[in-house]
Amino acid sequence: MDIRINEVKGVLKKYGQEHLLNHYETLDEEHQKELLDQIEKIDFDLVKRLYEDTKKESKYGQDKITPIEYLDKYKLYDDYKHYENIGKKAIKEGKLAAVTMAGGQGTRLGHNGPKGTYDIGLESHKSLFELLCDGLKEEGKKYDVTIPWFIMTSRENNKATIEFFEKHKYFGYQKDRNIFFFIQGELPMIDTEGKILIGEDGLIKQAADGHGGIYESLVKSGMTAKMKQMGIEWVFIGGVDNCLVKMVDPVLMGIAIDKGVTVACKSVVKANPQEKVGVFCKRNGKPNVIEYSEITEEMAEARDAEGELLYGESHILCNLFSVSAIERMGAEPLPYHVAYKKASYMDRDGKLIVPDSPNAYKFEAFLFDAFGEVDEMAVLRVKREEEFAPVKNADTVGVDCPKTARQLYKKFHNLD
Ligand code: UTP
């Protein structure tokens, strides 16, 4: 143990993070070991670089942004059936799996527990997880297959998520046969001086590394290998908080296969040019998403000859990938975006500090930053009222909240 501690101390000294062992002696043996394990796993050069990046201006300033082509699902005419038939065949052959990203903290919603366990207030009181599972079961029936379901959790909510599934008997899905859980990566949180925070348990304060962590986690957890063993070639990746998400879509899949692209994404047209959503674009010639904060008013208003917004296709976290594209994306590190958040921590004297304003940096990768890995991808515009009812905020906010999601869900399923 002494040798190990000394080695750890040496690393901490090199990076100015010696305080991480301040409370080491007060921990029991198990936690001491856990803390050392955590420290040994930290990429201190990365943490140092991320801290330095917090002081830089946005690196996007010089990027060349241009519009991206898209197809409208309801203007495909004769091609609709053609794509649909190709997709149906692949689904029947068991080539499609679904992945739900459920590792987020859901801070805006403010629900105590994993977001997927949230009851949006339907008469059935079904949770988001159950609504998603209902969709998979219904689609699976159409093609006489069970769509394998992979669920990404975070270290923070993994236990609670699995307990919830246990309690609800996996909604009729079978654990380890057609439902699989895997845990996403995490990164330490740091203060404004670049010091890594210690949480109230005396361990490193870590936070999930964003939905962009999906590719690496799928590969590292062995899920892509499992998919290949199961004969899966295509993976739909979506969020846990869209209760109308259509994870099994033969038209989207048929387009990807027919056009020979390895990524195909769904979009909905912006409700108005000022809507605060990220939109599909090309960045330096490669597919990407531009955030609302990055887009100029002129770009947001610009229209093509048919009167359609040039940057009007919102990214709704409904994306289809080939397994090989996921593997390639998982091998390349993504940039991290910084968020300034409130985070409680233990100070040098062992006192718990609960801040009432942001005090710490959290780093997150975004799923769409990997899109540039491919030269071309397909974007398919679908109807908002059919496929997009997100639960982001509490009802008091009034948009993208349980109330709006419930209304959209009921309308689509004729429940009124
Ligand atoms: P959001 O960006 O809306 O984040 O995630 P969130 O955690 O749900 O909510 P806020 O921002 O804290 O209020 C979109 C989707 O990506 C997943 C979420 O679970 C959601 O399905 N996600 C996000 C992860 O799986 N891991 C992450 O680290 C972040």
Image (cartoon, grey):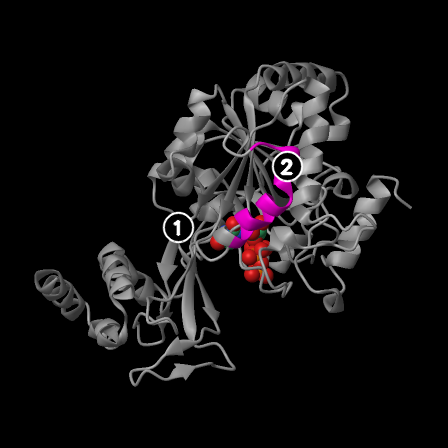
Residue 293 appears in the rendering = no
Query: In this figure, which residue is indicated by the disc labeled 1?
Result: 185
Kindly report the distance in space between the C-alpha atoms of the residues bearing marks 2 and 1.
26 Å
The N terminus sits in image quarter? bottom left
Q: Quadrant of ligand 1?
A: bottom right
| Circle 2: residue type | Lys
Q: Is residue 402 left or right of residue 24?
A: right
Give above or below for 48 relative to 120.
Answer: below
In the rendered image, residue 389 lying in the magenta stretch gets the answer no
x and y, in percent, of residue 302 in the image: 67, 49
Q: Is residue 116 left or right of residue 362?
A: right
x and y, in percent, of residue 47 in the image: 29, 61
Query: In this figure, which residue is indicated by the disc labeled 2?
Result: 266
Q: Count residues near mark 2 (Cα–Cα under 10 Å), then give few for <14, some for 14-19, many for 20+.
A: many
x and y, in percent, of residue 252 in the image: 64, 27
The magenta segment is 160-174
Q: Count residues near mark 1 (Cα–Cα under 10 Å), then give few for <14, some for 14-19, many for 20+.
A: many
Residue placed at 67% from the left, 32% from the top? Answer: 136
Residue 407 appears in the rendering = yes
Give above or below for 264 relative to 126.
Answer: above
| Circle 1: residue type | Gly
Residue placed at 59% from the left, 59% from the top? Answer: 113
Figure quadrant of residue 131: top right
In the rendered image, residue 171 lying in the magenta stretch gets the answer yes
